[in-house]
Every structure is written in structure tokens, then in C-alpha cells.
Image (cartoon, rainbow, N blue to C red):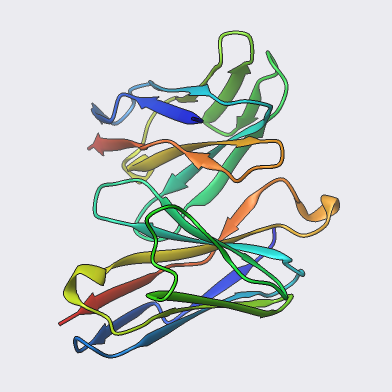
Amino acid sequence: EDKVVQSPLSLVVHEGDTVTLNCSYEVTNFRSLLWYKQEKKAPTFLFMLTSSGIEKKSGRLSSILDKKELFSILNITATQTGDSAVYLCAVRPYGQNFVFGPGTRLSVLP
Amino acid sequence: GAVVSQHPSWVICKSGTSVKIECRSLDFQATTMFWYRQFPKQSLMLMATSNEGSKATYEQGVEKDKFLINHASLTLSTLTVTSAHPEDSSFYICSANGGQEARGYEKLFFGSGTQLSVL
């Protein structure tokens, strides 16, 4: 059965800290891995990763995929209170629907 | 990016009534849409895959007669919660692949969600 695991499940940090969120997966016929940020309502897209070792970057957020070890990390540097959210990792196998992880709830304190 | 509109944002209804939730792709055609349910502090749970012009594919444990899905056009899918009960109260979210490759076919774009409260 396809599975996506995220750690930690929750995290509390102070503004300015750097955080690393982890996502590991077990799927057959891996196609892509996506990161989403969910605040109060629907998830918003952050990154899509398909190749190992290529870092994707957007402002203070960056992500990288390791297809050999079957994991991805999402880094957030110089965190701000607006980064507080649930970060979801989703994996899409070929020919199948997305499989979502449980999410990491990040709380950034002022 | 592609835009998915979901309506209503929230609904309160009495037990026993039916509630319809609409999900529209505004700037692309979505042959496939997905319906998720999310309980507080939990991740998204896929309920069903909605295919334009054909019957929806339901995940194990999801009652087909309880959660009616209709995908009559390439831009609209609806989820009807029939004879709603308090245990159906939840956050429901729809999503769609972003149409053609140029619009991000690989990505899921989400509607804004519907908070259903059944009294």
C-alpha cells in the first residue's frame, strides 16, 4: 500500500528560526512529490519535485528530493508568523491518485 | 495558476436534509476532479474521483448513496451529501489537475473548501 509519512507532526519555533520538515514515502511507480501549505482553508501549492538532487527555491522556502532514499525535505529560513500553517506532502504515483501525508503543523511564535 | 472555485464556503443544515457543494474549474477543463474530506487537525482524506461523463470512483469505506457525485461537464463537479447527519459535519475540499501541460497538469489545484455543519 502506498504511504507518505511526515515528521515532525507538529513543531513550535520562534520567528527567525530555520525549520526543516521531512517527508518520506513508499509508493510504486513514483512520478512526483508535491508540497502544499494549508492555512485556514484549502492547500496552496508550493513545490513540485520530480528529479533527485535539484533544489527548488522560492524566497525563504526551498525543497529537495532524494529518490534513492525516498524522501524530501522542505526548508524554511528566517521563519515569520505568517509561515504558521500545516505543510502537506503529497506523492503521485504513475496512473494513480495523489497520496497525502498527515501534514506537519508549524507554529511560529513572535 | 489554474483556478478552482468551490461553493458554498460554509453551510449549516438540519439533520436529514441534503446539501450540494459545487466545484468549478474556472480557466481550464478538468476531466477529473477529486473530493476530499478533512477532519480538524487531520490530513486530507480522498473520498472519490469524479470523472466527466462517467460514474465517480469511490474510495473504500465511502458510501456512494450518501455522497452523490456528478461531473456533468468539463468544468463542474458536484458533491451532494444526502440525508445529512451530525457525523457528516466536516470540511470538504475539491481539487482538479491543472488541465494541459502548460497549465500545470501535474499539479493539484484546490477549491477553497466547504465547512459543513449538520445540526
Please, is residue A109 above or below residue B96 in the view? above
Q: Is residue B12 left or right of residue B94?
A: left
The residue sitting at 83% across, 50% down in the picture is B101
The residue sitting at 41% across, 39% down in the picture is A87
Q: Nearer the viewer, residue B100 or A57?
A: B100
**Rendering quarter of residue A55:** top right
Please, is residue A45 above or below residue B12 in the view? above
Image label count = 0
Residue found at the far top of this picture:
A68
Please, is residue B91 above or below residue B21 in the view? above
Give residue B92's position: percent from left, percent from top. Answer: 39, 66
The residue sitting at 23% across, 76% down in the picture is B117
Q: Nearer the viewer, residue B74 or A38?
A: B74
Give residue A69's position: percent from left, percent from top. Answer: 56, 9
Q: Is residue A71 left or right of residue B37?
A: right
Give residue A52's position: percent from left, percent from top. Answer: 69, 16
**Rendering quarter of residue B56:** bottom right
